Image (cartoon, grey):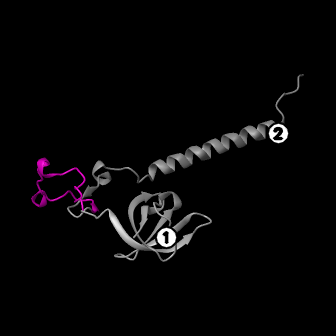
Amino acid sequence: MAKSQQTFNKSEKVKKRLKKRKEKQERLAERRANNTKGGDLDDMIAYVDENGRLTDTPPDPTKKKKIKAENIDISIPKREEEEIDPVHEGKVDFFNDAKGFGFIRDAVSQEKYFFHVNGLIDEVAEGNKVSFELEKGLKGLNAIRVKKI
């Protein structure tokens, strides 16, 4: 007589696998039975009230504001051009002749402006009164066309 090919260990593994599958199906059925997610469409809808808050009640149509599309401006407001005197006067606050740069303190606003030797028209030294024009540089306004007064 031929011996059975199925050993005790194989049959135990099959039993264990079937038991796990059955437990998994029971858990799935239990989750489906106790499911509270989803539900009704009315439960899922959210409304925005007149103050911009989310609510579950629909907005009151009497509080609705009508806005005409013509009244909506989609543009940047025009900036008023200020008449600025292009020539400023000031005093050389600091000047490094070796490195070729310095700072001028404006006589009116008391602000300091950087200047470079390339922007000089006349030779200057610390303490000289100068006239200059301003130009936008990488790190702010720079003085150019610097002349001694």
- CA distance separating discs 2 and 1: 92 Å
Give the amino acid at mark 2. Answer: Asn
Which SS does the magenta portion mostly show? loop
Please tell me how crowded label 1 is: few (under 14), some (14-19), or many (20+) other residues with Cα within 10 Å.
Answer: many
Locate the N terminus by quadrant. Answer: top right
Q: State the residue at coordinates (67%, 40%).
A: 18
Q: Position of residue 97 (x, y in %)?
A: 59, 67
Determine the image quadrant of residue 80.
bottom left
Q: Secondary structure at mark 1?
A: strand
Outermost residue to the right: 1
Q: Position of residue 101 (x, y in %)?
A: 54, 65
Determine the image quadrant of residue 11.
top right
Q: Is residue 37 magenta?
A: no
Give the amino acid at mark 1. Answer: Phe
Residue 103 has which mark? 1
- The label nearer to you, 2 versus 1, is 1
Locate the C terminus by quadrant. Answer: bottom left
Q: Position of residue 109 (x, y in %)?
A: 35, 75
| The residue stretch that appears in magenta | 53-82
Q: State the residue at coordinates (16%, 51%).
A: 72
Q: State the residue at coordinates (66%, 44%).
A: 19
Q: Position of residue 26 (x, y in %)?
A: 56, 47
Please tell me how crowded label 2 is: few (under 14), some (14-19), or many (20+) other residues with Cα within 10 Å.
Answer: few
Residue 15 against residue 62 in the figure, above or below: above
Residue 9 has which mark? 2
Relative to 101, is 80 on the left or the right?
Answer: left
